[in-house]
Amino acid sequence: MRAYQIVAGSNSLDGLRRVEVTDPVPTATQILVRMRAASLNYRDLMIARGHYSGGPVGANTTALSDGAGEVVSVGAAVTRFRVGDRVAGTFFRNWADGQPPARPLVALGAPPADGVLAEYAAFDEEDAVALPAHLSFEGAATLPCAAVTAWHGLVENGRVTPGESVLLIGTGGVSMFALQFARLAGARALIISSSDEKLARARAQGADGCINYKATPEWEHEVLRLTQGRGVDHVIEVGGAGTLGRSMASVAVGGRIALIGVLTGFANLVSPYPLLGKQASVKGVFVGSRGHFERMNAALGAAQLEPVIDRVFGFDETVAAYRHLESGAHYGKVVIRI
Ligand SMILES: NC(=O)c1ccc[n+]([C@@H]2O[C@H](COP(=O)([O-])OP(=O)(O)OC[C@H]3O[C@@H](n4cnc5c(N)ncnc54)[C@H](OP(=O)(O)O)[C@@H]3O)[C@@H](O)[C@H]2O)c1
């Protein structure tokens, strides 16, 4: 079958290779899926660049964690799925629900787990979910990492309620899902972006407060102004060390910061003490469980919510898709049709 792999030792997008590999053979508890679409996350750039946890990949690894397709065969012991079902694999293997397991979590697309940018992928039946019926394969392929992370951080951990305010950082995959979930919950969304054009699109999608962080580098003052000095109830913190201090300045008394991203790196960490007087909290979010994914899919289905897709690339345009994500020109998700 055709696949794209990140080659062992890769430290740039040049490590992304189109290859021919043998088709996976499902075990008794696995389903074999004809993948139809996959999507990119910022993590996939980090993996190709050799910056993902633990450094460069040590073995050739099929790329990308997020994809959707249809079941073409099932192992003898499979009970959850049938041939013809439309499914997506979960980002993590072996986290059905509840608290994360104590053992290290294994995620697709980085050793030891191959990803989904291939014609076929085998998933344990416990590591797959049914797709919301209204979504195309391209739409569903955007869900496993970015959407589940936003859902977990804002809805299940954050318990966002109507009338609360939510701050979103940038207009990438996680932030666009968080904008949609904030709106769905009846919350007020504020968003920062490098681009006025992207902010205009976010406003059209329901963002109430829009701040250009290039024009207004000290954007926390504007967040406070837009919230009458109160600050926001939730921050979906995807920016990392370079934005965390401003996020802490932006959060309201009793507010919650979902610590998610590392776009500006991990170094130069700021003091957490601004949180003390506000009695605000920071909680780490690491994608989520199959339960998060399934509950989110139910909500997506009920609201007929469509993921924000920036662009769909062909399979042979995979390198261009990575370069597009790297450019930062995207708004929402970048998808590859398989
Ligand atoms: N913890 C987890 O489980 C988890 C899950 C998913 C993602 N993440 C992390 O979350 C982050 C976002 O991931 P993603 O896949 O959504 O990324 P993405 O789709 O590539 O979006 C990145 C966007 O963030 C904005 N941005 C970049 N630098 C910024 C800065 N200095 N200040 C403010 N905004 C900035 C830009 O938006 P504009 O062009 O609008 O400025 C950029 O397009 C990454 O660090 C990723 O590793 C973590």
Image (cartoon, helix red, strand yellow):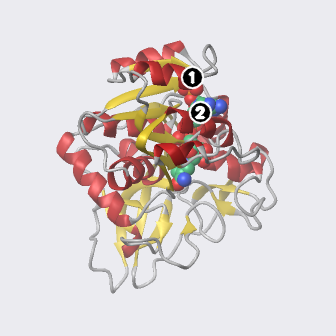
Residue that label 1 marks: 219
Residue that label 2 marks: 246
Q: Quadrant of ligand 1?
A: top right
Note whether ligand 1 is within 8 Å of mark 2.
no
In this view, 288 is above or below 164: below
State the image quarter where residue 292 is shown.
bottom left
Left or right, 204 with reference to 134:
right
Q: Which x, y percent locates residue 212? A: 55, 17
State the image quarter where residue 293 is shown.
bottom left
* 45, 162: nearer the viewer: 162
Q: Residues within 10 Å of mark 2 (few under 14, many from 20)?
A: some
Left or right, 2 with reference to 188:
right
Instruction: Please tell me whether mark 2 sits on a helix, a strand or a loop.
Output: helix
Cα–Cα span, label 2 and label 1: 7 Å
Q: Residue at x 68, y 36 (%)?
A: 242
Q: Which x, y percent locates residue 226? A: 41, 19
- Disc number at residue 5? none
Quadrant in the picture for the N terminus: bottom right
Residues marked 2 and 1 touching at CB (< 8 Å): yes
